[in-house]
Structures are given as structure tokens and as C-alpha cells.
Amino acid sequence: MKANAKRGLSITLALLAGGAPAAGDPGAGSRAAIRLDARERQLAGLTYGTAERRSLEKVIRTVARLDVDERKLTAVTLKVGGYIKDLFVDYTGKPVRKGEPLFSIYSPDLVSAEQEYLIARETQKALVQTKVPSAAESAASLLRASRERLRLWDVSEQQIRAIEEAGEPSLYQTVRSPASGVVLEKMIIAGQSVQAGMTLYRIADLSTIWVYGDVYEYELPFVKVGQPADIRLSSAPARVFHASVAYVYPTLDPKTRTVKVRFELENHDFFLRPEMFGSVELRVPLGERLVVPKTAVLDSGRRQLVFLSSDDGRLTPREVELGDRVDEYVEIRRGLSAGERVVTSANFLVDSESQLQGAESMMGMMGAIGMGDWKMESARPMAMGAAEPANPPAPSQAKPGLSSTEEKQVGDLRVAVFAAAETAKVGESAIRVSVHDAGGAPVGQAKVSFNYTMDMAGMAIASAEAKELGDGVYEGTATFTMSGPWGLIVQVDRPGKPTLREKFTVRVGG
């Protein structure tokens, strides 16, 4: 029922060409104004909206990923090699405080350095009363150098004093945490041999959390450092975390066409954890703009059109320049004024009918298939029915369906189109084209083809090549998808002659 109503609407719409478009209306082009009565508007399902000024707020939404604050990451390494004895922090995730013992280590290099320090200290004491100033000065210099080496190897002042009090090297030194935080990684076990420079622990201070969001390239102009944002987590949907844009990264991901944006959150209660996921909302006030509903705009990529509606049912195409798209609205920068009424549904149907009425109906169709640079040969359809044509097609080609044959004078030729069978049927049907010269002689060795479609909005245009059967008759196969009148554009090409084209109508039965 609905399909029949739409078909009836397309065929029976009383569309009136509005003549030349008004001056300054850039959306006219090949489209023309059309007029629909109340019943036709109801069948098409037309709805309307109004161009109006609104205060817009653009909302940018993206996925949030929580991570550690890179500025508060600490790696625990050694400057000497050795062997791990005891582990005091022995699992990942354990919280530690600055100065808390992590592990103890035996290092032959460290023991030798401690022994050298003790010897230098004893030597300096023995030479305090010497009468050779250079010897005392040399001993003091050696003591300072050996002590400095211990300090550079991260032996603390407290540990050096313990060595001095003991008077002998300490075989095992305790390594303490350089920062407070949580152990993210532990790469050692008791008894393991380690080398200088190896990372043994990674410790992170989680009192501050970084949040990453990916913003699309086209949204980037709306994002600024310091801009407020709301962050929500799937694990706590009722809780909103307020943050601000801390940094917009300078590079773009070529695969996703997004730019990474970083936010910062305080995490004093340690509720937030790295690698949590959530959502980020950035609200950008755009001020007051002239807008129409998104559905009012017909966007072909190269041009954007709306259809203005007047009280008498006339729909006029108007080209517009678009701005920002926000929720259900799109900004109009040029082409409309506040208060103008526009069509917000069935735009494709209206646009199709407008294009058909923009010029002669078949000129619109030819433009759609790339042949808009030619026109039909002016021809008077030859009388059919009781009156016999002056030069009818050969009897062998007339077939029972010849009574419905349509013949026209096309340039210097007489062309007829008819179904090979009694009538054309839905599905594949053989269509014949009879080509004779003005004197009635058959024309052979021509290249004949035809395009065909049903004259209703949204129907595709198909084409077929016709093969020569003899006696000026050519046959091609058409696939008809429904019954009713179908328009055919026949094209005849002859060597050394201009191309001739003309429109015919074939009626297809059920």
C-alpha cells in the first residue's frame, strides 16, 4: 500500500516549474521550484522546520584512559654489580615510603671501596702529626676521594658512619627506596646476580593521575589548554571528576586521525587506578548561531541545499553554506535568514522532482547519466492505430505487439520501438528497434543502444546494446522490475553521421 502510494505520488504530483530562479539564489542550478497540494505533501510525508538563532554548545565526547603521572615515576637502579641477599619489598603493588629498605646486596666492588676508605682514614690519622706537609696533604686527599666514591655509589652518610664505627667493611649494604609510592614492577628475586644500570624496581606516586583522551582531527580547533572537562568512570557512574586540559599532544595518529589530549586528576584517596577506563566530556560554548535541523540539509559533498517552503505549497531550492554541526542542528553561515521555513523530511524525493522540473524532464535524466550536452530530435509521433504508417516495419518484425509500436521521425531516420513478444513483461524482455531512412529503406550496419528507466523518483537507469537482426531491425534485452510505462532513450550511431537520440515509451504488463 505504501509503495503504491509513493508510486502514485511520483507519477501524479502536479509539479509546476517555477520558471527562472530568483536572482541571487545560488541553489537553483538545474533545479526548479515545485508545488505540492495538501494531499501530495501528506503522501510524501513532508515535515518542516524554521531557521532560527540558538545558543549552541558543542559537546566533545571521547573515551578516557587513566595512567600514571610520568613526572612521578621512579626507577631503582644500582651503580655497582652484585648479588641480592634479602628482599624487604618482595611483591608488585606494595606501597613504600621514601627511605624504606628495599633489599640488601653483596657487591665485591663496594666492599673493596669500603676497605680502601678505611685504609685511607687510618693513614690520614697516622700522618696528622707528620713533619712532612705533603704526606699529610696526600693522605687527606686520598681520604676525600675514597669517601666521595662511596657517596657516588649511593652509600648514604649514615652507612659511611656505620663503617667508620665498625672499623671494617660491611659485606651487605641495604638499598632504600628513593621515593614514596606503589611498586609497579619488581624485576629481582633473592640470590639474583645484578649488573650496574639494571632497573630493579619501578615505583609510582599515584597521588596524581593522568587521563588520556583521543580527539578527532575536526574537533581539535575546539580544544584548548585549561579548558574544563568532566570525567566519569564505568566503575562509579554516579561520581563526576572535574579536570582540565593539561596538554594537547603535537602529533596526530595517522590510523585513527586523532590527537591525544591529557587531563590531570588529584587522587588523594587513591580511588583512581592506572588503566581504568571511562568517558570525557568537553563542553564548548559557541555563542548564538543561525541554525536549522540537520535533516533539512541535502548534502551532496560539493554543494548543500535546503528547500524553502511557502504558504502556497511551493518548495524552492536554496544553496547554503554550512558551519558547525551540533547535536540535531547545523549552523547556516550563508543562504538563509531567521524565520524562513524549510523542509526537514523527504528531501531526496523533493530534490529528485525538482531536478526533473529544472528543465525538460528527460534532460534531467540525461544529465544524470552523463549525456546532458545533447537534446532530443524534435519529432512528431507518427499516427498509430487505425492509420497505417507510410513505411511500416517489415511484417516479419511487426509481431502481434505492433499495434502498440511507437514510431518517430528522428533526424533523417524513421525509428520505431516495439516488444519482440506480444507484450513486454516484468523481467527480461526483448526490445526491438526498427531503423529506416526517410524513403523507407532499412538502415543496416548501425550501432544501436538504449537506456531505460521508469519515470519516477529513485529509479535507476539501465542500458542495453542492440544486435542487428536484418531488414533494419535491431534487438536488445531489457530487464523490467515492475509493470507500467517505461521510458527508453534510443541512440543510433552511423559511420560519418551525427549521433541521433530520441525518447520512446514501452508499456510493460504484469
Image (cartoon, rainbow, N blue to C red):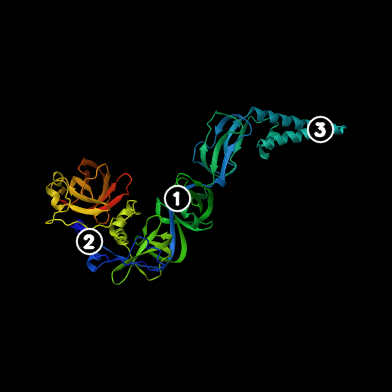
On screen, residue 400 versus residue 253, left or right, reads: left
What quarter of the picture does the N terminus occupy? bottom left
Q: CA distance from mark 3 to mark 2?
A: 111 Å
Front-lying residue, 100 or 492:
492
Q: How many marks?
A: 3
Query: Is 156 located above or below residue 322 in the figure?
Result: above
Q: CA distance from mark 2 to mark 1?
A: 50 Å
Label number found at residue 138: 3
Instruction: Please tell me which of labels 2 and 1 falls first in the chain.
Output: 2
User: Dot 1 surroundings within 10 Å: few (below 14), some, or many (20 or more)?
Assistant: many
Front-lying residue, 299 or 80:
299
- Residue 506 seen in the figure: no
Instruction: Please tell me which of labels 3 and 1 falls first in the chain.
Output: 1
Looking at the image, the residue that sits furthest to the right is 131
Query: Quadrant of residue 56 in the image?
Result: bottom left
Q: Residue at position x 40%, y 61% from top? A: 330
Q: Amino acid at mark 3?
A: Ser
On screen, residue 112 versus residue 365, left or right, reads: right
Q: Measured from the top left, where is residue 54 in percent x and y?
A: 41, 67
Q: Residue at position x 47%, y 60% from top? A: 284
- According to the picture, the residue beneath numbered tag 2 turns out to be 9
On screen, residue 386 versus residue 489, left or right, reads: left
Q: Secondary structure at mark 2?
A: helix
Q: Measured from the top left, where is residue 189 in percent x and y?
A: 52, 31
Q: Measured from the top left, where is residue 472 in percent x and y?
A: 21, 44
- According to the picture, the residue beneath numbered tag 1 turns out to be 64
Q: Amino acid at mark 2?
A: Leu
Q: Are marks 3 and 2 in contact (CB under 8 Å)?
A: no
Q: Amino acid at mark 1?
A: Ala
Q: Residue at position x 22%, y 50% from top? A: 439
